[in-house]
Image: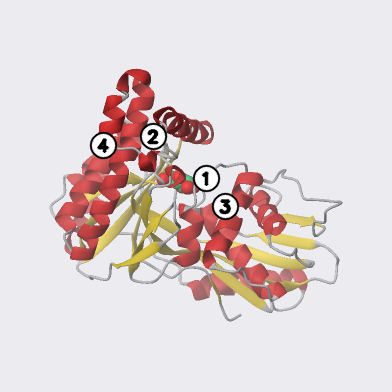
Amino acid sequence: MAEPIVPLESLLKEARAAFQAEFGRPPPLAACAPGRVNLIGEHTDYNDGLVFPMALPLVTVVVGGPSASGQCHVTTLAAGADQPLSVQFAPPSAAAPLTPGPPAWSNYVKGVVANFKGGVEPFEAVLTSTVPLGAGLSSSASLEVALYTFLEALTGRAAESLREKALQCQKAEHEFPGMPCGIMDQFISAMGQADNALLIDCRSLESTLVPLADHQISVLITNSNVRHALTGSEYPSRRRACHETARLLGVKALRDASMALLDERKADISEEDFRRARHVVTEIARTEAAATAFADGDYATAGRLMNESHASLRNDFEVSCAELDQLQELASSVDGVFGSRMTGGGFGGCTVTLLKQTSVEACIARMREGFSGKATFYVCRPADGARVVPT
Ligand code: GLA
């Protein structure tokens, strides 16, 4: 059986009660933003490429309101957050800007506050989340975008556009936790729509909704519950390698490179960087083809492309790991499975499997039996992006 998806209403209830206990009044405002699963298009966003994620019914919720204390006071109830679970800081000013520092979770908060256009007034808030932390389902982007949305409601100043909001949240993540992420996670968290996946062009920031509402088809997320220490250091090094190869090829980004160009210049590129670039060039093509296949209801083709994406991430980009490979192989061997792949940054986290709804239980059983670790399963339909919710 898959994990039950905790309804938004229950999360809100928990956050409201905690706010009431801590601040002695009900919270006047609430906002939420989802995590995401990427169906295909991995490590392409920072190469100006295409990605194809969907927003999840797993969300981060922020409740709160203005504070008379002169401070910003935030408490987290999210499972796995590091101590202390409450932080207080003065709203930043030019003379006294915010700086990153422990606890780790508070850097997402401070990053968003520091990047909120026009500054914030003192506030108090409680946040909680059903997006598993560090599982590659964008718990960080969901926190950033939920808090940004909350601050919009608090100040009455909305971002010019959802794109602008996603960009500010991405900047927050670059500057405070120091993760040089692409735009995918914040973008889908801000812009997701129920029953649709979103094809995002990470160069133009144009996006196209692709309906994914067929109830005979399921998206199964499998959390390996492993996270290898490499994640922190390998992501920036992959990003650098891609940018270096683009420079060497004389193109703005690997989005502009073709396999023909890459083959032509093979002798000038290290064997490793060649494989990294080959992943990106072929993954962008696969993403475009997969979005068309999804739109046509051609799940066999979409699934084959997902399997190919996994092989490319494993062999060429080298961001998979033994646990993800094992889960991918187990899922692919089940009747009714169209395709399966690792999803997110890699080195642990989750796989995503596209399959017939009638095969979900068999697929979960096969993975449970065959997997060396302890996996957790989520069956998700595409959900809505960030929004203010009634308190
Ligand atoms: C992380 C980053 C994204 C993206 C993926 C890999 O989730 O935050 O921007 O680069 O890895 O596709």
Is 150 rendered above or below residue 263? Answer: below
Task: Name the residue located 18 percent from the left edge and 64 percent from the top edge.
Answer: 297
**CB within 8 Å, label 1 to label 3:** yes
The x, y position of residue 374, in whole percent, is: 37, 44
In x, y percent, where is residue 37? Answer: 39, 55
Category of crowding for the residue at label 1, using alpha-carbon neighbours closer than 10 angstroms: few (below 14), some (14–19), many (at least 20) = some
Instruction: Mark 4: give few (<14), some (14-19) or many (20+) Cα within 10 Å.
Output: some
Contact (CB < 8 A) between labels 3 and 2? no
Circle 2 is placed at which residue position? Answer: 319
Q: CA distance from mark 3 to mark 2?
A: 22 Å
Residue type highlighted by circle 4? Ala
Query: Mark 4 or mark 1, which is nearer the start of the sequence?
Result: 1
Q: Is mark 2 within 8 Å of ligand 1?
A: no
Q: Which residue is mark 4?
A: 311
Q: Is residue 69 left or right of residue 228?
A: right
**Badge 3 amino acid:** Gln
Which dot marks residue 91? none
> To which residue does mark 3 refer?
170
Residue 319, image quadrant = top left
Pointer 2 local density, CA inside 10 Å: few below 14, some 14–19, many at least 20: many
